[in-house]
């Protein structure tokens, strides 16, 4: 379940940042870059802030997590 929440939240944030960069300001692309850097960082460190937040909110980890995507 944690993996599903993670993918939905990250996908929504990427789409939102692209829409904001088109209609508000191109500087919103930096948010997309930030998301990408965090995904790369979590691949190497096996730690993900979003995963920590979701676990504290009570989302069950059923085998998969963002650090194993």
Image (tube, grey):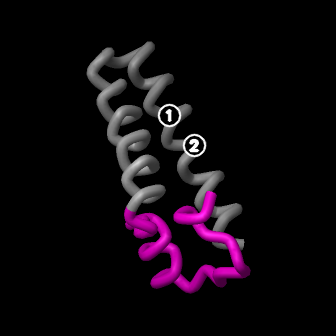
Q: Residue at x 68, y 71 (%)?
A: 64
Nearest to the observer: residue 18 or residue 23 = 18
Q: Residue at x 56, y 85 (%)?
A: 58
Q: How far apart are labels 2 and 1 at the CA level?
A: 6 Å
Q: Which mark is residue 16?
A: 1
With respect to residue 51, does 34 lie above or below? above
What segment carries the magenta color? Answer: 45-69
- Give x and y (percent) for residue 47: 41, 69
Q: Residue furthest front?
A: 44
Q: Which residue is mark 2?
A: 12
Judging from the image, what secondary structure is the residue with disc 2 in?
helix
Nearest to the observer: residue 45 or residue 14 = 45
Q: Residue at x 38, y 64 (%)?
A: 45
**Quadrant into which the C terminus falls:** bottom right
Q: Which mark is residue 42?
A: none
- Per the image, is 32 magenta? no
Q: Residues within 10 Å of mark 2 (few under 14, many from 20)?
A: few
| 53 relative position to 4: left or right | left
- Per the image, is 57 magenta? yes
Nearest to the observer: residue 2 or residue 47 = 47
């Amino acid at each position: 379940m944690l993996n599903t929440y993670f993918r939905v939240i990250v996908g929504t944030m990427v789409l939102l940042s692209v829409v904001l960069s088109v209609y508000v300001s191109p500087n919103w692309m930096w948010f997309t870059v930030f998301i990408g850097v965090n995904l790369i960082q979590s691949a190497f460190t096996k730690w993900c802030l979003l995963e920590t937040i979701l676990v504290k909110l009570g989302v069950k980890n059923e085998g998969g997590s963002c650090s194993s995507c």
